[in-house]
Image: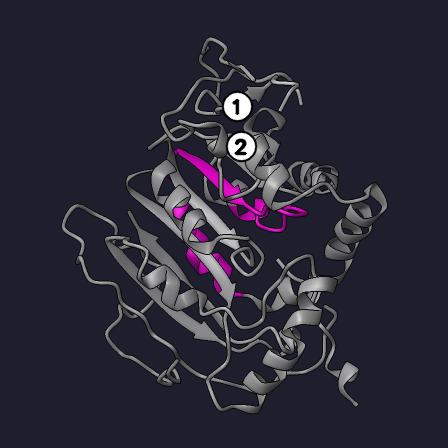
């Protein structure tokens, strides 16, 4: 998730509860009550299916990861709960992997005014970006007509919720975000999209420790998230852990520009500032390459340049299969 820099800037015990059947029975929460304690990227690599809009996830999927890095165009400036049944998961086998402990470690509490300001800014400044990212509808079409348990990491203000509601009438959606002030915006977006209230749950957590059971999700979604997580590799391993066999990881991420380009020079120069003003967002991560090497059975990926994203370019988008 990001608020991009404008180019104008340059001139104790663990308690487990019993499990009951609900749309969110796969949630897992542990309560800690212990009070004492390289080279430039080729412009195009063609070994990819024609479009990531159609999933090739199946038991017969190719074991090789495939990347397509394509196209480029000019860029312009932008500025960038209720009680729930819970159960223990083997994914959290130590205090260090407890979701709340990890949340506090990798995303220490911010002042309320800052989290509210950032949530409001995300809700108001991302509309032009969302309008331009037309390929999202192609990616989310993979969920059409399928009953689905969907987990979205870094759900933010909920711009993707409209895709879930239109794709399937039986989606159970869990949204995870480290900024608790995002919840009211996400809940409003869910209501506006027609997603029933009982089918949406917001959880205050980070992607490095997902409070969800192993192999419980049909799809995991992340859009503009891996730029700001503390540990990209851990996040990707968590995504694989919670996906069912054959499950989909749908992603849209901004990645570092080509080595030697003016854009890459600008990204490298402004990256420290971006991390401060955009809540940890990195401009120079090779996220597409990291996804391709994360051990998914198949990765279909393309890239695009967006006029509304300024320095936050290019974008890598596609589908990875467990």
Q: Is 17 in front, or is 308?
A: 17
Residue 155 is situated, as x and y percent measured from the top left of the image, at 59, 46
Up the image or down, 261 lies above or below 179; here it is below
- Which sits earlier in the primary sequence, circle 1 or circle 2? 1
| Quarter of the image with the N terminus in it | bottom right
Q: Is 221 in front, or is 91?
A: 91
Is residue 179 magenta-colored? no
Please indicate, yes or no, whether residue 144 appears anywhere in the rendered image: no
Disc 1 vs disc 2: Cβ atoms closer than 8 Å?
A: yes
Which residue is at 40% across, 24% downward? 89
Asked which secondary structure carries label 2, the reply is helix
Which residue is at 46% across, 38% downward? 150
Q: Is 149 in front, or is 86?
A: 86
For residue 224, which quarter of the picture? bottom right
Q: Left or right: where does residue 278 sit relative to residue 170?
A: right
Is residue 137 magenta-colored? yes
Name the residue tied to disc 1: 29
Up the image or down, 67 lies above or below 152; here it is below
Name the residue tied to disc 2: 99
Please indicate, yes or no, whether residue 124 appears anywhere in the rendered image: yes
Residue at the left extreme of this rendering? 60
Q: Left or right: where does residue 169 sit relative to residue 298?
A: right
Which residue is at 50% across, 71% downward? 255
Q: Measure how far apart labels 1 and 2 are at the Cα level.
A: 7 Å
Q: Residues within 10 Å of mark 2 (few under 14, many from 20)?
A: many
Please provide the residue range marked out in magenta: 134-163
Up the image or down, 7 lies above or below 200; here it is below
Asked which secondary structure carries label 1, the reply is loop
């Amino acid at each position: 998730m990001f608020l991009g820099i404008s180019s104008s800037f340059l001139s104790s015990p663990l308690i487990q509860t019993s499990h009951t059947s609900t749309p969110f029975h796969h949630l897992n929460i542990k309560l800690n009550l212990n009070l004492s304690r390289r080279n430039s990227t080729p412009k195009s690599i063609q070994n990819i299916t024609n479009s990531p809009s159609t999933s090739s996830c199946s038991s017969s999927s190719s074991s090789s990861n495939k990347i397509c890095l394509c196209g480029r165009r000019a860029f312009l400036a932008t500025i960038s709960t209720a009680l729930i049944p819970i159960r223990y998961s083997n994914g959290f086998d130590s205090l260090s992997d407890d979701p709340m402990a990890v949340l506090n470690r990798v995303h220490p509490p911010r002042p309320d005014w800052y989290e509210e300001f950032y949530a409001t800014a995300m809700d108001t400044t991302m509309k032009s970006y969302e309008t331009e990212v037309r390929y999202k509808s192609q990616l989310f079409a993979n969920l059409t007509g399928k009953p689905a348990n969907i987990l979205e990491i870094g759900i933010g203000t909920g711009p993707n919720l409209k895709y879930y509601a239109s794709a399937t009438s039986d989606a159970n959606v869990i949204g995870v975000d480290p900024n608790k002030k995002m919840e009211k915006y996400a809940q409003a977006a869910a209501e506006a999209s027609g997603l029933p209230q009982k089918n949406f749950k917001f959880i205050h957590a980070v992607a490095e420790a997902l409070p969800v059971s192993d192999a419980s999700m049909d799809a995991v979604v992340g859009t503009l998230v891996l730029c700001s997580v503390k540990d990209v590799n851990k996040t990707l391993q968590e995504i694989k852990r919670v996906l069912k066999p054959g499950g989909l990881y749908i992603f849209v991420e901004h990645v570092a520009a080509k080595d030697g380009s003016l854009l890459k020079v600008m990204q490298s120069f402004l990256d420290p500032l971006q991390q401060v003003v955009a809540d940890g967002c990195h401009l120079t991560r090779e996220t597409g390459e990291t996804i391709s090497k994360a051990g998914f059975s198949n990765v279909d990926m393309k890239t695009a340049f967006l006029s509304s994203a300024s320095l936050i370019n290019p974008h890598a988008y596609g589908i990875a299969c467990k």
